[in-house]
Every structure is written in C-alpha cells, then in structure tokens.
Amino acid sequence: MEEKVKIFFCEDDENLGLLLREFLLAKGYSVDLFPDGEAGSKGFLKGAYDLCVLDVMMPKKDGLTLAQEIRNANPNIPIIFLTAKSMKDDILEGFRIGGDDYLTKPFSMEELMFRIEAILRRIKGKRNKASLTYKLGDFLFDTQKQTLSNNGETTKLTTKESELLSLLCAHANEVLERNYALRIIWVEDNYFNARSMDVYITKLRKILRKDPSLEIINIHGKGYKLITPQGEAADEIRVL
C-alpha cells in the first residue's frame, strides 16, 4: 500500500484552515494543521513531511520567517505560500527564500490541489531519473543532491535553483529562452514567475562567481546563456 503524502499546513484563519484540511484529507492526503507560525515552527521539527503550505500573514511568526526556518531544517521540501496580499514584493520575497509556488486569496481548493499535485509529479519524476552530475569549470553540480561543490566547499541549492541550473547546463553556451524555462519549471509564464526566475539567476551568479571562467549572461529579449570554459558544453557524468 502506497504511503500517504504528508502535508505540513500552517494557517491562522481557523475556518479556512479546517476547510482546506478536510478537503485535502478527503483527497487522500495526510495533513497536520498549525494555527500560527510559532506552533508551526515547533511542529515541523517533530514530523516528517513531503510538502508545506504556509500562510504568509500569521501572528507570532509570519510565513516567510517560518519558511526560512523550514529551509534550514530541510532545504529540499517544496513550499507553497498562501497570501491575501497582492504586493509584488511579498510574492518575490517568498521566491527568494526558496518557495516553489504561491496562491493569492481568495482561491479555489481545487486549484491548491492541482498545484500540490504538479509539484509532487515533478519531485517523483526527478527521483525516478538517473542521477546526473555536471562538471562546470571548477564546480561539480549534482542534480539529484542539488549541490554545487568547489574546492571542498559545497553549496546546497533549492529545488528551483537546481532545476534552473540543470536547464542552463543542458543548454551550456547556447541561449536558454526565458519562456521555455518558465514553462518547464514554473508551468506558467507570468510577471511574478519571470521576476522570481531573475532572482534565482542572480543567486546562481553569486555562487558561480568563484570560478571566473563561468558566467551567466543575459541575452536581451531572449533569455540567458551559461558560458563555460573554452566554449564547450558542460560535461555530463551519469550515475545509475
């Protein structure tokens, strides 16, 4: 019997929280509901979860702060933010922390379920694939472990950072079109997803800066290009 997907759910609106919890339970998920960020912070460390759904505006500790703590404890767990705000900065901050998706209230319960399923499908697909490691100049990029290693120092990437770098490596020294990357990683090409991708590009540039032979450049009106040494494609090392 397949084990149920366990969802960590933190929402201070009691009615909404209980409604969504009952809906997800009816759909076959296991759900632990916490009423605020402080309770969620303690609860997350006691359980083993597959995915997080966090309200952004919560008492005692907001969802963004909680997400940072969760990322420190588990860098790979997917996070979906729920927010009543339409402020672009709030949404972008969620992506900077390493959020995988967001929903602006009000939203339909079916849409939340579809987004959860989409993220879980991507995770399952990645687990079923052979491990692929790229040699990028002085760096070694392990796509399964989501790590970038350089001179004995290892940096853990978020899921989105790893997916984006994987695409750049697959198109090394070629143009990676923005629209294509958005459809592959974020599913939807819109303003917020495009801005979040820019944030991740900036973070990857800072990491790769340790090797001067590597560079991610903007191709105006098209996308990005990962420049690797001698203009050669990134070397692939496949491990079954």
Image: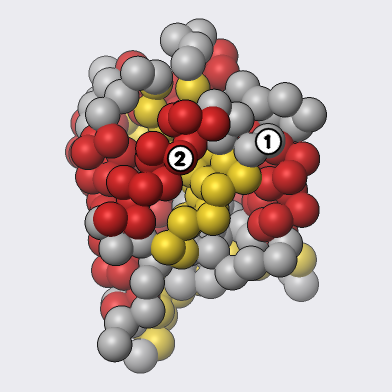
How many neighbours does mark 2 have within 10 angstroms: few (below 14), some (14-19), or many (20 or more)? some
Q: How is the image coloured?
A: secondary structure
Left or right: where 176 falls relative to 31: left
User: Residue 108: x percent and y percent?
Assistant: 26, 29
Question: Can the viewer see residue 229 in this picture?
Answer: no
Q: Which mark is residue 36?
A: 1
Q: Give the Cα separation between the discs numbered 1 and 2.
A: 13 Å
Which residue sits furthest top?
Answer: 87
User: Residue 86: x percent and y percent?
Assistant: 45, 10
Viewer-proximal residue among 203 and 126: 126
Left or right: where 167 falls relative to 34: left
Residue 62's quadrant in the figure?
top right
Picture residue at 31% right of the left edge, 46% below the top: 23
Secondary structure under tag 2 reads: helix
Vertical position of residue 51 compared to residue 49: above or below: above
Quarter of the image for the N terminus: give it: bottom left
Picture residue at 38% right of the left edge, 40% below the top: 20
User: Residue 67: x percent and y percent?
Assistant: 64, 42
Secondary structure under tag 1 reads: loop
Residue 123's quadrant in the figure?
bottom left
Quarter of the image for the C terminus: give it: bottom left
Q: Earlier in the sequence, mark 1 or mark 2?
A: 2
Q: Which mark is residue 189?
A: none
Name the residue beneath numbered marker 2.
18
Viewer-proximal residue among 121 and 153: 121
Vertical position of residue 230 compared to residue 153: above or below: above
Picture residue at 31% right of the left edge, 69% below the top: 124
At label 2, the amino acid type is Leu
At label 1, the amino acid type is Asp
Question: Can the viewer see residue 105 in this picture?
Answer: yes
Picture residue at 56% right of the left edge, 18% below the top: 90
